[in-house]
Image: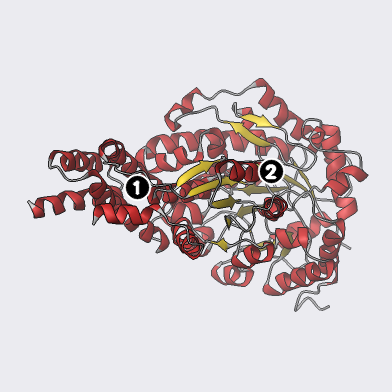
Amino acid sequence: MMTSGERLVKALKGEKVDRPPFICPGGMMNMVTVEVMQQVCAPWPDAHVDPRIMSQLALGVHRLTGIENLGVPFCMTVEAESLGAQVVMGTLETEPRVAGYPLLEVAEWPRLRETGKGAARMEIVTRAVAELAGGNNGLPIIANLTGPVSLATSLVEPMTFYKAMGKQPKEVHGFLSFITERLIAFGKAQLQAGAEVLTIADPSGTGEILGPRRFAEFALPYLNRILEELSTCCKATIVHICGRLRSIFKEINQLKTDAVSIDSYTSVAELKNALDSKVVVGNVSTYLLQKGHPERVKRAATACLKQGAAVLSPACGISPLTPLANLQAMAQAAKEFSPAGAGG
Amino acid sequence: MMSNTQNILDRLARGVRDMDEELAVEAAREALENKIEALTAINEGLVKGMNEASRLYEEGEYFVPELLLCSDAMYAGLNILSPHIQRSNEKSKVRVVIGVVEGDTHDIGKNLVKLMFDVEGFEIYDLGRDVPLTDFVSKAKEVDAHMVCLSTLMSTTMDGMSVVIDLLKKEGLREKVIVLVGGGPVSQSFAASIGADGYAENATRAVRLAKRLLSQKGVAFFDDDVRRAAG
């Protein structure tokens, strides 16, 4: 009997497993619900700023939903806050988000300095990882990073950033290089604390927003820089890209990641056909998970696995108002699924 | 003279379409020097160029960064031309309340729609992003809006859109205002399921849809005035 950790790593590497794992990485891909927070007495926003509460909540998510991984943090503001973005911590039902940018223009990036408050939040996350790793329960811990373009657009107004790609490409590259080194350091800290799988999510750096040419110029190389640097310190990597991916299938093939996680607008089967070797993680509709009935969720999850998803996961994380029964139905679908050719 | 006018209008359009702010500014100044009516220069030059940019965006030639640069060029030209518009009788415009629903701070899509509405001459009340759901309703009431546009990029906040529609019903405003929804995770079927009047896949389609729904409701929009003035 393999542990959840072994199963996930094997599945992400494209190796044979007894059944597909069911995960929700964390970070941008939220896996926390209000029901869980209440049942384990580890509510937002407290959980974002206290390593004990953070790790309790991550464990609670696994225990109550059947999600087969642990993952922190529960938002994508940690890296931005560490460089001076103003962050509001949200409520029980809403995630932390960036409320103020430290930069007015991209060219000001050399001014960015690490802030004490922001560094403290990075420390909270790594301590939560260390606590989870100390539990030694066979569950894979996923380290989560915000992608370079998404971090950039948390430090300067996104419209300003996208325009600068055309007007000041050199400054944009300088900015992204700087950010990428920061991300590598934060990723390394999480992995050294005991996380074994890395997920990078880049919702603002999609093919739909940037187009294939700019995705190849501004997103791909920096994602790959992180992956090159960190894949030696972790067992497997996932990159999540939102939106319709058809225009950037070629570029996705060039990502140096084991697995690609997608949202519900890209078909698992279509992407799988376009990929040389990577596995697909995905992609049960986040909205269906919040609003649908368990039976429908289970059917959607099974359909997703039949299409060829190697790892079952919500399309874009879940809403905090998602009912537990729907997540349990998804866990059930993964448990009951027998991959073709695996001998039952 | 006629060909000179056409040449200037073409350069205005090209400046916008090709993201060439300097060209748009230069051509706008020439338009004034050559006594081309400001409204004509705007509609047959700048707006035409922006429409071409939108077409390229829909065709997948342009993406968000290109569209933003085109709009910068358009605004640079507008800044020069708009003080010279002769406004004989200011007509009431279409009033639109727009914003990103609570819980979401992604506003690219919303800003693109706002931009396109702006080009059409709509009067826009932009509530920004992460907007408390009741604010949409109170603003619509306050400005006597014709249309409320809701955007989100996150599937976790989509449900807020149906809450706004329910609130509009409670306030007795639902029949009065057109509700448009849009954003990455939103679809036609979702729009129908929550009882919105329409869904548009992108900013240019949002404009076409808005104009169609307004016409169906019998709301006269600025577009006609512009055409009359230009024609």
Residue A344 seen in render: yes
Q: Residue at x 68, y 53 (%)?
A: B172
Say few, some or many: other residues with alpha carbon within 10 Å of mark 1 (under 14 / 14 to 19 / 20 or more). Answer: many
Q: Residue at x 66, y 63 (%)?
A: B195
Label number found at residue B134: 2
Q: Going by the picture, which residue comes out furthest to the top?
A: A116
Q: Residue at x 89, y 63 (%)?
A: A1
Label number found at residue B70: 1
Amino acid, disc 1:
Cys
Q: Chain of mark 2?
A: B
Q: Nearer the viewer, residue A141 or A149?
A: A149
Label number found at residue A2: none
- CA gap, disc 1 and disc 2: 34 Å
Where disc 2 sits, the SS reads: helix
Residue A19 seen in render: no
Q: Nearer the viewer, residue A304 or A180?
A: A304
Q: x, y percentage for residue B223?
A: 36, 55
Q: Nearer the viewer, residue A124 or A93?
A: A93
Say few, some or many: other residues with alpha carbon within 10 Å of mark 2 (under 14 / 14 to 19 / 20 or more). Answer: few
Is the residue under label 2 in contact with that under label 1 (CB below 8 Å)? no
Looking at the rendering, which quadrant does residue B207 occupy? bottom left
Q: x, y percentage for residue A21?
A: 79, 62
Q: Nearer the viewer, mark 1 or mark 2?
A: 2
Looking at the rendering, which quadrant does residue A121 occupy? top right
